[in-house]
Amino acid sequence: MATSQERFEINKPEEEWRKDLTPEQFHVLRKHGTERAGTSPLDKQYGKGTYVCAGCGQPLFTSETKYNSRTGWPSFYAPLEEAIGTSVDRTLFMVRTEVHCSRCGGHLGHVFDDGPAPTGKRYCMNGAALDFKPEKS
């Protein structure tokens, strides 16, 4: 499944993405891959700060909306305003809502309707698609 680059602010050829990202980041962000559950250190990161797109640096989520979903992936109940976009994902013989960075189109993960209040959403993100920027003291 390819994301159309024409609608995003950041538009790079595949070769440039490969050069700028680690192999795992490229697989997740540009090829819609999924990392194995429990492999990202960001799943257990609970410091204060901001989670940004590993592809373009756009802020996506804050630590205030992160919670332990016990799924093995970093999970949030709400993104920052206008930080993400969604599309229908019909792979794996099911219909899910895919989440991508609104700036570069990088695949981040999926959103489900089984999260906590106040939104009831679980933004289940691949840690490889994110970087954590700690809050400055």
Image (cartoon, grey):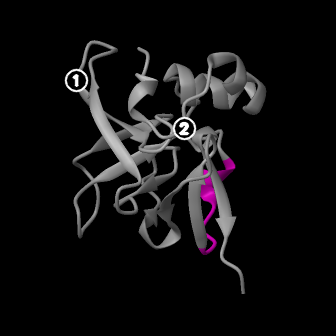
Determine the image quadrant of residue 44.
bottom right
Comparing 124 with 38, the one in front is 124
Q: Give the structural element (helix, strand or loop) at label 1.
A: loop
Is 95 positioned to the left or the right of 108 in the image? Answer: left
The magenta segment is: 41-48
Going by the numbered disc 1, the residue's amino acid type is Val
Is 28 positioned to the left or the right of 32 in the image? Answer: right
Numbered badge on residue 10:
2
Q: Give the structural element (helix, strand or loop) at label 2.
A: loop
Is 59 colored magenta in this rendering?
no
Q: State which tag comes first along the sequence, 2 or 1.
A: 2
Kindly identify the residue that appears in the image at 63 percent across and 44 percent down.
Answer: 54
Q: Give the answer, above or below, for where 131 lies relative to 62.
A: above
Is 101 positioned to the left or the right of 110 in the image? Answer: right
Numbered badge on residue 95:
1
Measured in 3D between alpha carbons, the distance from the residue under mark 2 to the one under mark 1, in whole angstroms, is 27 Å
Determine the image quadrant of residue 28.
top right
Cβ atoms at labels 2 and 1 below 8 Å apart: no
Numbered badge on residue 34:
none
The crowd level at tag 2 (other Cα within 10 Å; few <14, some 14-19, many 20+) is: some
Going by the numbered disc 2, the residue's amino acid type is Ile
Kindly identify the residue that appears in the image at 66 percent across and 32 percent down.
Answer: 25
